[in-house]
Image: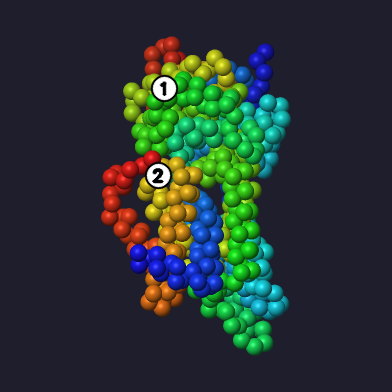
């Protein structure tokens, strides 16, 4: 039995009195690669922030590696949606990646081990030649790889990705998914995406979220799930038999 | 040569030595903290903190304590309240800044009007007068500089992580919100250092102009701090010289010199500026 990395039980989150997440229960186990789809405003980003302890649910229980999320979130690698950063910020690619190590020891400088880890991680995502480049002077795809590296230097047990391929060219997206494929051997991955095709090819399990979570611990969703989630009939084109998302119907 | 003669002549006056020392001491604070103010885009929060600190000046007059000493706890209190209040849900950050900005100033005016007699140096707190900086204020400025340099040295990597992406920093275990409040306190201390030089109303100029000009020359935060310290010292010294020469108010002369250099720096297209 694979151990649970993140567990949510009966989680409710409200924003200004309106529910954003309703009764969400999910268990993510080591080496899971879970894709979460759902309409805009369906609570996908909120769900990730609940897992990170950045949002405390009004009701329900959140466990990260068996403990509370604030205490254990340092074992989560987080790649936010369009990082809300300033493109003109005076920081190099290397220093952005190193910020992933900033919480290891307060006070003082980064250790040689921190630097080696940042170096190796940048190499893994093929961004080492850009190490000294200012962060704003990168293309969208390059920047996304830097943010993955920043999440990976924390040596996480689970990686949370929020719309990682939004605004990135198709051929670069493929490269990106190949990186994830390699990472899957080492950690659990949860990816929020609107990109159904990619999800259907790369992930192992799919959940659909629209305030409520539709999830069967598998890669299949029923058309009823999708209709309930999107609140309208969804045309779902299965992508060849091996990767189909819908049951045959 | 003319400069040399001027320097020698001018240094014979004790007040000029004090003025130049104040210029250098204030350059350190506003070079370092100004770099954060500009890259973290907290210019208006900083303006609010600086203005609100006027309450501390008024309180000082009222209690008969040296206003510069009284302004330290007062500006730190306003920095912490802006930092906390602006985080409340359902309250916009700029509204919070505006409210505390005005409240601080109103408190200052209230205390001054309650104080019997008339407030002699009031004008110099508002608009600065670097030519009248007393010796005791230089000591306070030096002390605040030391505090600022030590804290920024200790927390450089944490401040950088927090300024770049507060949420991510929180996730990796950096106490980002507490560091943010600490940064606002450093802004408050810098405002205190700058009050004598340019005055409460013009503090924001020295927090932003030298750092903005330096940003055009470098992509590295600590180099930006060093450069903006140098720029700030230059602006102040040139400003003091011109105000002495033409009998102009020193605070506004310094700011206008800074503004002119800023405009000149805009003429250089940034891709032509050597970034190192």
Q: Name the quadrant of the N terminus of chain B.
A: bottom left
Determine the image quadrant of residue B67. Answer: bottom right
State which mark lies toward you, 2 or 1: 2
Q: Is residue B215 left or right of residue B181?
A: left
Percent across and percent down for residue A221 are: 51, 22
Q: Nearer the viewer, residue B168 or B41?
A: B41
What residue sits right under mark 1 in the picture? A126
- Residue at horizontal 39%, vertical 21%? A175
Chain hosting mark 2: B
Question: Of all residues shown, which one is farthest toward the bottom?
Answer: B117
Determine the image quadrant of residue A61. Answer: top right
- Residue at horizontal 37%, vertical 47%? B217
Question: Of all residues shown, which one is farthest toward the top?
Answer: A242
Percent across and percent down for residue B242 are: 39, 71
Say yes or no: labels 2 and 1 on the same chain: no
Q: Secondary structure at mark 1?
A: loop
What residue sits right under mark 2 in the picture? B218
Q: Neighbour class for label 1 at 10 Å: few (<14), some, many (≥20)?
A: some
Image vertical order of residue A136 relative to residue B224, above or below: above
Visible residue check, residue B184: yes
Percent across and percent down for residue A227 are: 47, 31
Instruction: Tally the numbered discs.
Output: 2
């Amino acid at each position: 039995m694979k151990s649970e990395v993140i567990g949510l039980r009966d989680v409710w989150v409200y924003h200004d009195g309106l529910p954003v997440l309703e009764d969400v229960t999910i268990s993510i186990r080591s080496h899971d690669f879970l894709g979460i789809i759902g309409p805009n405003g369906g609570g996908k980003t909120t769900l990730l922030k609940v897992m990170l302890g950045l949002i405390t649910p009004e009701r329900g229980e959140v466990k990260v590696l068996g403990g509370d999320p604030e205490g254990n979130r340092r074992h989560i690698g987080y790649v936010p949606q369009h990082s809300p950063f300033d493109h003109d910020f005076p920081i190099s690619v290397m220093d952005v990646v190193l910020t992933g190590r900033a919480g290891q020891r307060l006070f003082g400088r980064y250790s040689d081990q921190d630097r080696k880890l940042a170096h190796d991680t940048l190499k893994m995502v093929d961004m080492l030649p850009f190490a000294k480049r200012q962060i704003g002077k990168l293309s969208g795809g390059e920047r996304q790889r830097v943010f993955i590296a920043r999440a990976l230097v924390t040596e996480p047990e689970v990686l949370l990705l929020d719309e990682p391929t939004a605004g990135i060219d198709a051929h670069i997206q493929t490269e990106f998914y190949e990186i994830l494929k390699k990472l899957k051997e080492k950690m659990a991955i949860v990816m929020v995406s609107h990109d159904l095709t990619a999800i259907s090819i790369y992930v192992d399990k799919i959940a659909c979220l629209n305030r409520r979570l539709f999830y069967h611990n598998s890669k299949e969703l029923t058309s009823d799930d999708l209709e309930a989630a999107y609140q309208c009939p969804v045309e779902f084109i299965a992508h060849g038999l091996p990767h189909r998302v819908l049951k045959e119907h | 040569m003319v400069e040399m003669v001027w320097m020698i002549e001018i240094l014979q006056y004790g007040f000029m030595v004090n003025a130049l020392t104040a210029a250098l001491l204030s350059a350190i604070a506003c070079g370092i903290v100004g770099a954060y103010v500009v890259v973290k885009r907290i210019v208006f929060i900083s303006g609010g903190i600086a203005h609100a600190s006027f309450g501390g000046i008024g309180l000082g007059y009222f209690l008969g304590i040296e206003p510069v000493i009284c302004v330290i706890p007062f500006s730190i209190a306003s920095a912490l309240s802006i930092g906390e209040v602006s985080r409340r849900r359902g309250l916009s950050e700029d509204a919070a800044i505006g409210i505390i900005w005005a409240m601080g100033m109103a408190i200052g005016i209230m205390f001054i009007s309650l104080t019997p007699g008339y407030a002699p140096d009031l004008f110099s707190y508002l608009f600065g007068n670097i030519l009248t900086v007393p010796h005791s204020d230089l000591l306070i400025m030096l002390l605040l500089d030391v505090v600022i340099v030590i804290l920024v040295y200790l927390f450089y990597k944490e401040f950088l992580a927090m300024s770049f992406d507060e949420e991510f920093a929180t996730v990796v275990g950096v106490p980002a919100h507490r560091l943010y409040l600490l940064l606002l306190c450093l802004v408050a201390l810098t405002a205190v250092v700058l009050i004598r030089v340019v005055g409460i109303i013009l503090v924001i100029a020295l927090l932003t102009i030298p750092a903005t000009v330096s940003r055009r020359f470098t992509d590295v935060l600590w180099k930006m701090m060093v450069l903006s310290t140098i720029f700030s010292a230059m602006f102040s010294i040139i400003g003091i010289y011109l105000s002495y020469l033409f009998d102009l108010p020193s605070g506004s002369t310094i700011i206008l010199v800074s503004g002119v250099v800023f405009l000149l720096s805009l003429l250089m297209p940034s891709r032509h500026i050597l970034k190192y």
